[in-house]
Image: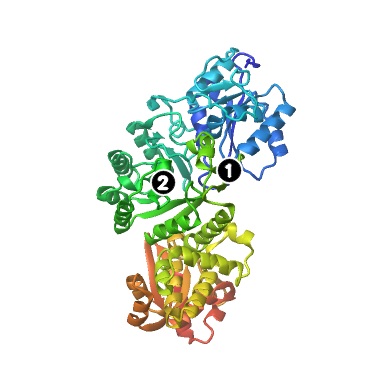
Amino acid sequence: MKSPVRQNSLSVLIPTLHVRRSVQAVALAAGNLKACVPPQLRRQTELLDLFPQQHTAELVEMFLARRPQLIAFPLYLWNRLQILQLCRELRKAQPNLLLIVGGPEASADAENVLLEGELDGVICGEGEESFGQLLQALAAGRTPVALPGFLPADAETVRPAEAETVRPAEAAVCRDLSSLPSPWLEGILPLTEGCGVLWEVARGCRFNCAFCYDAKGHQGVRPFPPERLSAELELFVAKGVAQVWILDSTFNAPPERGKQLLRLLIEKAPQIHYHLEAKADFLDAETAELLAQLSCSVQIGLQSADPQVLKPLHRALRPGQMEQALKQLSMAGVTYGLDLIYGLPDDNHAGFCRSLDFALQQQPNQVDIFPLAVLPGTELHQRQLEFGLKADPRPPYLIIENRSYPSEQLTASRKLAAATDIFYNRGRAVGFFLQVCTALKRPPAALLTDFANWLEGAAGIAAEKMLAAEHWQPVEILPLQQKFVAEQLRKAGQKKLLRITEDLINYHFACAEMLLAEECHPAQKLPPQRQYARQRWRLNPQVRLQKFTYDAEELGEWGGQPLATLARQLAAEPAYVIFLRRQGEFVVESLQEDFAKMLLAAGGKKTGEQLIRGLTPEDGAEMLEFALNE
């Protein structure tokens, strides 16, 4: 690879193609690279955010308009095909343009990536130091030689893409993380009030799961210096950061390291919401206590509830220990979710159903379910024949079948995964789901299978729509839940439970919406009181009103009891209930019927006079004044 640039003149682009627009669309890898660029070259290095909806021709035109001499792409499972196509088009449009990629896909499949993208080079592993040295050499007019982890296009090691096996390039590893500048502290990545942050606290993984790439290229865990973490947290607070995704595959391994991190978060930035990944084996009462002092959610990789399925994948599971660890989190009030994978070697659809039953019996706040991806560079990928796996060779490398899990069973698991996401996760069902299962005498996976079949049958939902669970909104799921559960109760001869179940589903939905809503503030600017009657009024969209058959406060207090017990114990007291957030507190209060109906009618089209029609002038004026002040 020769340097085609004039000395000290090097214009660089580092575009990041994100999965979608979201608060997690943070160009962390690009920021890390730019932070390691020599100061004199930083001004000539630009970061760009890209999204899948942008067309290749549009991107090529945008890049070339900036007249770069080198473009470096972080390459991931979700953007490999699009980025490499983009590189081929750039090569046609400007043959002398230097094209470099790095990231997980480049590290795991370097030689194929190099050829497919018609690239000038690939950086394998942790690329900051290599990238900085590469730019220094090019800017000085030198040919880069022997950079750690750098595979140039003219390397003798490159073989045809059709080769049966491809040897991964030696990955670069930064042994001393204290030598890496922070893209946050250097001001390279933007921080605005309410934004989200991807935050590295460590690199590496002490485990070596056969389906995962996290531990490849290095051994053990290397934490970033506490001084850097402390300074970054102080910056996040000063800038008003709202959420932080902690990039550590197992933050609590070993446990003391995790506890030190939690104490730092509590001390420096307890107001931020954190997303963490943990291993249940290392959760204890002290960790749960520390987590409870933070606004956070914890994701735990269960993957399967069958120890025999997990053992060949280098994972261990003691179900009793897992249950005890999750119980500690629940008792501490910590929000947590579980991960499951279907399509694992020596598993099948029946085994996946048993794993799902186990997971849902723990009452997690969410269950994330994924098909097995046979990722390049992992042990499963290298031993596909031995494990009896057949997977798509193209990203995202999803399982097609294995010797124990034929394709028709994978289809059944996919439908069950979608039904779980719709009904349990997006349908806010954690607070009532097990009670419904108990009342119907159906295991969780069986009931969700019934729901999937009901959606395709009685509800007339097309299979494509059901499988696209990520597009479902809670407000469209609620009536389907109500109708499905009511039909199941009638079939089971449990008509007496219809009203209490309907109330319970509505209560948990309203509470979930209230938790996610913005603060409900009184109106700041009001017209003179004499104009109230002519003014058109609209209820604050952060408020939810719901009519209940049973007392809502008692539902909240006793709602965990079996449905039959609730139906016997709770007296029917029909009332409208208001749900809202104010000054950090949750308000759940019963309303007088005429006041509730006035609020429900306030959709922005009716005047004050119309809203209070049928009431005495005194009562109507008092209610309207109260509603405005609240």
Check disc 1: other Cα within 10 Å, few if <14, some if 14-19, many if 20+: some
Query: In the image, residue 478 lies at what x, y percent?
Result: 52, 69
In the image, is 553 to the left or to the right of 346?
A: left
Horizontal and vertical percent position of residue 363: 38, 61
Indicate the amino acid at tag 2: Leu
Residue drawn 39% across the image and 58% down it: 358
Q: Secondary structure at mark 2?
A: helix
Which residue is nearer to you in this view: 529 or 100? 100
x 55%, y 34%: residue: 105
Residue 563 percent location from the top left of the image: 38, 75
Picture quadrant where residue 173 is located: top left
Q: Which residue is mark 2?
A: 310
Q: Earlier in the sequence, mark 2 or mark 1?
A: 2
- The amino acid at mark 1 is Ala
Where's the C terminus, which quadrant? bottom left
Q: Residue furthest left?
A: 286
Q: Position of residue 463 (x, y in %)?
A: 62, 61
In this figure, which residue is indicated by the disc labeled 1?
Answer: 391
